[in-house]
Amino acid sequence: MRRPVCALFAGALGAQLIAAFEPQAGFWPLAALFGLGLLVLLAGGRARGWGLWLLLGAALGLAFSAHTEAQFDALTAAYDGRTVRLTATVEDVQEGYTRSTVRARLRVSEVNGEPAAFCCQCDGLPLSRAGEQVEGWFSLEAPAPADRPGRYADEVAFLAGYERRFRRLGPGPGFRAWSARLQSRLSEALCQGLEGDEAGALAAMIVGDRTRISSELNSAYRAAGLSHVLVVSGMHVTILCGVALPGMDRRKWLEQGRLLAARLPGRMGRKLHRRLGVRLARLELAPPRPARGGFHPGMVWRERIAALWPVVLAALLTGITGFTPSVLRAGAAVCIGALGVWLMAPADPLTSLALGGLWMSAFNSYAVCDIGFELSFAAVAGTLAGAELVRRRAARHPAREEDAPRRPLPVRLAARAWDAFWEAGCITLCASAATFPVLVLRGLSTSPYALLSGVAVLWLVQPMMVLGIAAALAGLAPALWPVCRACAWGAAFLVRLLNGWARMVAGWPGAELAFDTGYAALVCLGLMGLCWLAFRWRVRARIWLPALLLAAGAGIGAGLVLNRDVVRVELIGGVRTPSVVLAQNGQTVVLYRGGSSGRSAVERWLARHGQEQATLLVDLRLDPARSSQPPAQRVVTPGRFEPYTDFQTARGGIRLDLLRTSGGVGVRVTVDRWQLGAVSGDFELAGAAQVDWLLASPSAPGAFRWEEMLALGHYDWMRPDAPPAPSRLWLRPGGGTKAR
């Protein structure tokens, strides 16, 4: 079979996702995965090879997951709940909740003077810069079980709270610290003389510095379907390194490899010729056609040496941008491409993609849980599919270029414009279709205008990247200040156009869509089935493409109707301080219990759903600190009321009744015919109130009688034999609920 590595990666990916997201499911999902592999294996024919490689991949994925889980379990058993002295390097810095603190990611090198190696997230670190080495006493807490896949995907083993005796030890050692300092210098050089959104967008696009970008501009890019532009990804690596990589024409390299093999003596030459011409073509490449042209041995080593420069550039860009999954994936592709140059046989794109995924998940199996990882691989797969469609269309019309000189100039310009439009539209559509299932299954909003934005303005990205990189590098040398300013102004002009387009599209109706996860999964499966039928029956693109767009439009319209007035209830944050989020028709109500993990969880939830701030925030703490509250249009603090004071408010179809007692705060939420209760602190009533759902917290809810319960963990006041409670609830108008 062709591309066995792809089947290996598919099996490993499925096993790792099951082990990460459904650990409580135990044996059955894994048994289903292995059963599927066995069925394919027993089917015979070409499917037998796929079944075998799927089974091997699933076994490999389970081995990766077991190794990673053992590492995190050992760290949790050693340090969870302890206050220790850490020596660490600051890798990433964001704006803190107060002026004297920052939110930082720390890579620990010593614990109480003993060597250690893990990462932690500290949301209250004293002012520090990226690349510095610091020391202090911190309290370590393992992430909540619901947050562990996302935290572990970022290699964050603990949430660290600063306690005392903070010291700065100077520049940190190692490549990561050096690249973090370089990122800060490049960002300052790039943004010097620029202000506002232009500086923030340029810093995010060029060096991955997102501290300067505003939440309003970030939301506009998301609504326009351009959020990937603000994240340094594989597209940026391709733009930077693709021009430096030698031509990777498949036929040329295979022909040169055969010519070189013919010059080698005897058995060695025949063996190399067979490998390049048969084995590699069968496993990774399409059967090549003989190419014409001469062969110069000196050219081989020149192009081999030239292939090393993109590897250096990719490694540098990966370090500067903080080793994000998409950049790591692109860097792995560049390295595999350079290896293909040295072997005089280009690597297959899909095989390279699968090898990159296996390499990234081998050291940390939770990497597959990262949204950036999933979106990056899905986007590349969709882009490759779109490029294949473009190639097939060009192969069906080979005479266009030969007849071009005989056609009038306006006809030629129109033909070129149509070809460019077709290529951009086809690739953008395929990439959007590939990433759509990931977005909806992870609860993220999508933009119906992504295709239009991709065709209209993505041509601005390449010249913007070139000018921005030139400005950042020239800004490091004072003698090149005029060059830096000229390039920065040119890049800022292009960014201004891109920002204007994003803000304009964000104001259009239906710019951001969110769907029921189960419904979206069914729609995605239906669209995938239509694509498979079109491929199987070899239906022309002019037939299946409009049909696919019509089916997608009908599915989106039905989803909007079905999701109208649906209230989503979700518990987020830490087990000790779980916050409650209630969302309906773009309005968000947050019941906030404090804690650094709780605030960061609320902010991440709002950012994922394209919101700058909550509509209403109710702070359930008795002694709230306003500086530690997430952003909201209106904040209600029942803890500042007099004891036994009640308060009522409503947002859309959500009505809240609040009561402050001497020792706590109680909330009753009414949605249609359902009632939900939440408590904070020591809350008691003369008689227990009846509610349908209890939004659980560590506090014993003696004031409520409930039928069902939502919880993030198993608390002390719960029955030992109580089944695991869900953490999400969807309330549909007129009846019907769904808990997850």
Image: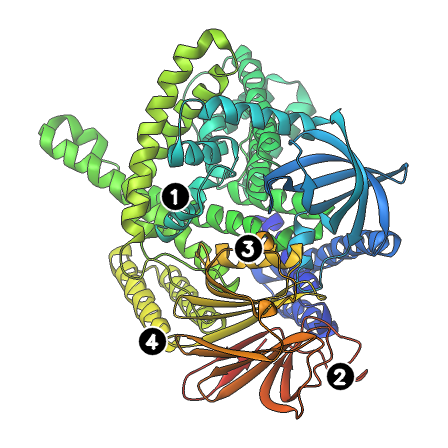
Q: Is residue 711 visible?
A: yes
Choose mark 3 or mark 4, whichever is in front: 3
Quadrant assignment for the C terminus: bottom right
The number of discs equals: 4
| Residue at (37, 29) in percent of width and height | 464
Above or below residue 167? Residue 5 is below
Above or below residue 526? Residue 676 is below
Q: Bin the neighbour count of mark 4 within 10 Å (Cα to Cα): few under 14, some 14-19, many 20 and up.
A: few
Choose mark 4 or mark 2, whichever is in front: 2
Q: Bin the neighbour count of mark 3 within 10 Å (Cα to Cα): few under 14, some 14-19, many 20 and up.
A: some
Q: Is residue 133 left or right of residue 559?
A: right
Q: Type of residue at label 1?
A: Ala
Residue corresponding to mark 4? 561
Choose mark 2 or mark 1, whichever is in front: 2
- Distance from disc 1 to disc 4, alpha carbons, whole Å, reads 35 Å
Element at label 1:
helix
- Distance from disc 4 to disc 2, alpha carbons, whole Å, reads 37 Å
Element at label 4:
helix
Of pointers 3 and 4, the one earlier in the residue sequence: 4
Asked which quadrant contains residue 536, the reply is bottom left
Of pointers 2 and 1, the one earlier in the residue sequence: 1
Name the disc covering residue 204, or none.
none
Residue corresponding to mark 2? 722
- Distance from disc 2 to disc 1, alpha carbons, whole Å, reads 53 Å
- Distance from disc 3 to disc 1, alpha carbons, whole Å, reads 34 Å
Compare residues 122 and 712 and report the one nearer the observer.
122
Of pointers 1 and 4, the one earlier in the residue sequence: 1
Element at label 2:
loop
Name the disc covering residue 604, or none.
3
Q: Are marks 3 and 1 in contact (CB under 8 Å)?
A: no
Q: Position of residue 34 (x, y in %)?
A: 69, 67
Residue corresponding to mark 1? 387
